[in-house]
């Protein structure tokens, strides 16, 4: 599925929720279901700077696609991570870099978070995108060589 | 006095919390369409209307820089600024008003002592004693000073209830100990430390003591002569006053001997390019234009509290503490951190294995303002081998019903995470 198709699917799922409590319950469920990353990746270097809670980031590149392993000490944040991984993981670097993550607004996730928490969310999304950009640059360099 | 403060000397024989809540306009608002339950008072307290009015009126009618003015407004403001100093002096029962130094807050007050006292008295291999439950603002300034002077920190441990081990404290004292610096009330655990005893032990060994009163000043009477501490620090915004104003009380004999920590206008006697002589206390420690509006606003807050009665506040908050402790302990899976016998109305807890951050953001949606995390006391949480807690810190405008609502909300959160 493309990034847009996955986003549309998530937006549709969120249409079932009438209020913030339902959305939060769903995030808790997603957060609990998302498996923790290998403890070897839970290092100081892999922490995302500026997030309110400890959030570890790791990615791998396979068959031209980026795969993300992200974890957080917050279950709610893990719920958000699960959504971002669903949208971006397994996609091509170029597509991730150019992705318009409109589902964050259309699901009401942004308005349900305070500016500080929404900021953490964007930091996470930007980290995923910048990682993809680096992958893309690396591919370009390797092709030239 | 030009700015009117609360002269309504209502005698509150029975504590009328509804009447008090009417004095705090912010408490009437809704957040996320729910009535605001403000349980983040250890971070900052809300301001009564008299303080808000005082600040507005000062800006609207009286603003002018203090000291050395030759005009009407400056004279007026200088008089009010010094009257505020006198109010603080009386509030703390200090001996002299020049023992009251206005700063920007506790952090600035402690940094000032760490620098100035360190310059005057601390040499290589000397030691500073503090406790395991200090706020970072009573650790880091001393670490910086120790690094500069080659000195070391020594740490008083506490037991699992959150009470300092005074026998261990006594063992730490030695001829190299230059100062003891202790938090009066723990911002994370609520423990009220036996500061009078701590000071007496230090004084037997001729060691001065600084008390970080950030979380004590708002909960009852503080008498610096009775405690006999050498320094006492507090912030205006934690005692229902404005932000950006704080106090450093210091005994005259120390303040006289310590060098200034900042240079600038207002603190000098005579300046030449070769040499500067400093002004007398308190000006020596108040370089630059002071936060005179903040100081006068703080004075208004102290008047307000005095009118309500510090004993009334203390007694009511004790009832909230006892009620809240019982209610919270009735929730299965909730663990309270900080069960000291002598405690302020602060509840630090963990709910099952629910991350504090998650509990905090859901409580926020329910209209309850709490704080989550390490509360700037990371070494304290190392004691318990956890990273932090959910902290509900109450004030005298909080109610038993709000505690009930917190408990109901926590039970709902438990269900969400089951």
Image: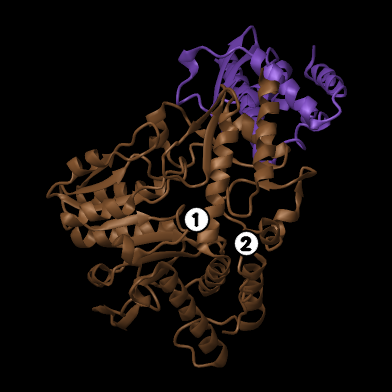
Chain colours: A purple, B brown
Residue A52 in view, yes or no: no
Frontmost residue, B392 versus B345? B345
Tell me: B151 left or right of B140: left
Tell me: B383 left or right of A37: left
Tell me: A21 left or right of A55: right
| Residue B219 tag number | 1
User: What is the x, y in percent for residue A113?
Assistant: 72, 36
What residue is at 77 percent from the left and 42 percent from the top?
B32
Which corner quadrant holds the N terminus of chain A?
top right
User: What is the x, y in percent for residue B407?
Assistant: 65, 34
Q: Secondary structure at mark 2?
A: loop
Residue B31 in view, yes or no: yes
User: What is the x, y in percent for residue A21?
Assistant: 77, 29
Q: Which residue is mark 2?
A: B47
Label 2 environment density (alpha carbons within 10 Å; few <14, some 14–19, many ≥20) = many
Q: Residue lying farthest top? A: A63
Q: Secondary structure at mark 1?
A: loop
User: What is the x, y in percent for residue A107?
Assistant: 81, 28
Up the image or down, B65 lies above or below B250; here it is below
Q: Residue lying farthest front? A: B13
Residue contact between numbered discs 2 and 1, judged by CB atoms under 8 Å: no
In which chain is the residue bearing label 1? B
């Amino acid at each position: 599925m493309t990034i847009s198709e996955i986003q549309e699917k998530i937006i549709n799922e969120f249409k079932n929720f009438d209020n913030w409590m339902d959305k939060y319950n769903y995030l808790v469920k997603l957060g609990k279901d998302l498996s923790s990353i290998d403890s070897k990746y839970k290092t100081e270097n892999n922490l995302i700077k500026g997030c309110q809670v400890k959030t570890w980031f790791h990615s791998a590149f396979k068959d031209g696609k980026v795969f993300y392993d992200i974890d957080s000490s917050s279950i709610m944040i893990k719920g958000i991570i699960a959504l971002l991984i669903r949208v971006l993981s397994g996609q091509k670097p170029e597509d991730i870099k150019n992705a318009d993550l409109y589902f964050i607004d259309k699901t009401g996730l942004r308005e349900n978070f305070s500016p500080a928490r929404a900021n953490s969310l964007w930091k996470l999304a930007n980290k995923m995108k910048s990682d993809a950009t680096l992958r893309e640059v690396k591919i370009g360099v390797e092709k030239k060589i | 006095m030009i700015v009117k403060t609360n002269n309504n000397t209502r005698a509150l024989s029975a504590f009328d919390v509804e009447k008090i809540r009417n004095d705090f306009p912010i408490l009437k608002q809704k957040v996320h369409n729910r009535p605001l339950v403000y349980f983040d008072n250890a971070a900052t307290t809300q301001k009564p209307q008299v303080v808000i009015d005082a600040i507005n009126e000062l800006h609207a009618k009286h603003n002018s820089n203090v000291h050395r003015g030759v005009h009407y407004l400056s004279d007026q403001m200088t008089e009010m600024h010094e009257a505020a100093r006198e109010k603080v002096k009386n509030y703390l029962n200090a001996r002299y008003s020049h023992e009251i130094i206005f700063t920007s807050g506790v952090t600035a007050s402690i940094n000032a002592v760490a620098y100035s006292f360190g310059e005057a008295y601390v040499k290589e291999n000397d030691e500073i004693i503090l406790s395991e439950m200090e706020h970072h603002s009573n650790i880091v300034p001393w670490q910086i000073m120790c690094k500069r002077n080659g000195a070391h920190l020594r740490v008083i441990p506490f037991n699992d209830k959150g009470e300092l081990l005074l026998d261990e404290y006594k063992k730490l004292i030695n001829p190299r100990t230059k100062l003891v610096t202790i938090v009066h009330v723990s911002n994370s655990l609520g423990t009220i430390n036996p500061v009078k005893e701590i000071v007496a032990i230090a004084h037997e060994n001729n060691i001065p003591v600084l008390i970080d009163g950030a979380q004590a000043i708002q909960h009852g009477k503080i008498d610096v002569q009775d405690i006999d501490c050498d320094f006492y620090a507090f912030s205006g915004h934690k005692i229902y006053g404005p932000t950006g104003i704080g106090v450093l009380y210091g005994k005259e004999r120390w303040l006289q001997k310590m060098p200034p920590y900042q240079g600038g206008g207002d603190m000098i006697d005579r300046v030449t390019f070769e040499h500067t002589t400093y002004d007398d206390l308190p000006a020596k420690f108040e370089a630059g234009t002071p936060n005179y509006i903040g100081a006068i606003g703080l004075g208004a807050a102290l008047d307000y509290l005095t009118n309500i009665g510090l004993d009334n506040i203390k007694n009511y908050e004790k009832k909230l503490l006892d009620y809240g402790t019982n209610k919270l302990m009735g929730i299965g899976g909730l663990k309270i951190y900080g069960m000291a016998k002598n405690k302020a109305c602060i509840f630090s807890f963990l709910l099952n294995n629910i991350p504090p951050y998650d509990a905090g953001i859901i409580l926020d949606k329910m209209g309850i303002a709490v704080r989550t995390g390490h509360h700037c006391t990371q070494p304290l949480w190392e004691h318990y081998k956890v990273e932090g807690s959910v902290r509900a810190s109450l004030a005298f405008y909080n109610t038993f019903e709000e505690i009930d609502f917190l408990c109901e909300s926590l039970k709902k959160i438990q269900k969400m995470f089951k």
